[in-house]
Structure formats: structure tokens, C-alpha cells
Image: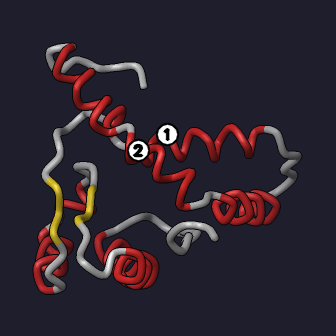
């Protein structure tokens, strides 16, 4: 089943490339899985916060969830990247082409149910963060 379309980037990540990536990979997938609407969660990367990116998201009526800076432990995607890295570390990768093939293969094995577990962990993560006074949590 997989997830959103995965795009392998071969250049620096700039606002225009971010917009193109959202347009090519996220919008269609999100609209199919969530026809009733969806909210985009981003970190505070300059690419995400640029004037060009903001204007484009506004023009596309994309709702963006406000998110605190320096809080990667609250992003489910960080855990998903961790799983991906762990799986890749167990493979013999001899060159960039091997790495790209392995990334795409592993990405496509992530099922909606697997990913949903990370999303469902959010209330617990938020409670842990509140209980820690906003300090880093181990998750």
C-alpha cells in the first residue's frame, strides 16, 4: 500500500522545490485518503516558513498546524524516519543507486495501519510533554 509518493531529492531543498514536492506528492494523496479535509504539519524549517511557501499554501487553501520549535519528539515522522534508517542499516548498500532503491522499497512497505500507530501516539506524547514542563521527552 505505501504512504505518500516519495520523492528523492538530488539538489538543495529550496521553497520552489518544496512547493513542487507538496504538489506532486502530498496533495493528491491527502485528498484521496482524507476527502473531508486534512491539516499539514510542518517543522519550522525556513523552506516551510518562506514567503513563497506560505503564499502558495494560502492560495491552495492548505491548513497548517502551528507547531512549537525544537520539538522533533512530537513529530511522528521523526519516528518513521528512525524506523526507515534502522531498516536501511541492515542492508548492504554499495552505492547511491542501491540506497535509493532500498529507501523506496522500505517506504512502500509502510502500511496505513503502521503509520496510524504513530499518529495515535500523539495524545500520549503531548501529555508527556505537558507533564515534563515542556522539556524534551523520550519517545
Quadrant where the C terminus is found in the figure: top left
How far is disc 2 from disc 1 in space, using C-alphas? 5 Å
x and y, in percent, of residue 120 in the image:
38, 44
Quarter holding residue 34? bottom left
- Number of residues whose C-alpha sits closer than 10 Å to that of mark 1, classed few (under 14), some (14–19) or many (20 or more): some
Q: Which residue is mark 1?
A: 79
Q: Which mark is residue 117?
A: none
Seen in the picture, residue 11 relative to 109 is either above or below; the reply is below
Q: Which residue is mark 2?
A: 76
Quarter holding residue 130? top left
Left or right side of 2 for 117: left
Residue at 34%, 68% (x, y): give it.
Answer: 14
Q: Nearer the viewer, residue 88 or 27?
A: 27
Residue at 49%, 39% (x, y): give it.
Answer: 79
Figure label count: 2
x and y, in percent, of residue 33 in the image:
41, 76
Left or right side of 103 for 129: left
Amino acid at each position: 500500500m505505501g504512504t505518500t509518493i516519495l520523492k528523492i531529492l538530488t539538489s538543495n531543498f529550496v521553497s520552489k522545490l518544496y512547493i513542487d514536492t507538496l504538489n506532486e506528492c502530498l496533495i493528491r494523496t491527502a485528498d484521496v485518503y482524507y476527502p473531508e479535509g486534512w491539516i499539514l504539519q510542518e517543522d519550522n524549517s525556513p523552506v516551510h516558513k518562506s514567503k513563497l511557501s506560505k503564499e502558495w499554501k494560502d492560495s491552495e487553501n492548505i491548513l497548517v498546524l502551528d507547531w512549537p520549535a525544537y520539538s522533533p519528539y512530537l513529530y511522528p515522522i521523526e519516528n518513521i524516519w528512525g524506523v526507515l534508517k534502522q531498516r536501511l542499516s541492515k542492508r548492504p548498500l554499495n552505492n547511491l543507486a542501491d540506497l535509493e532503491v532500498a529507501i523506496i522499497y522500505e517506504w512502500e512497505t509502510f502500511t496505513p495501519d503502521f503509520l496510524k500507530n504513530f499518529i495515535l501516539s500523539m495524545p500520549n506524547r503531548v501529555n508527556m510533554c505537558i507533564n515534563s514542563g515542556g522539556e524534551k521527552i523520550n519517545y
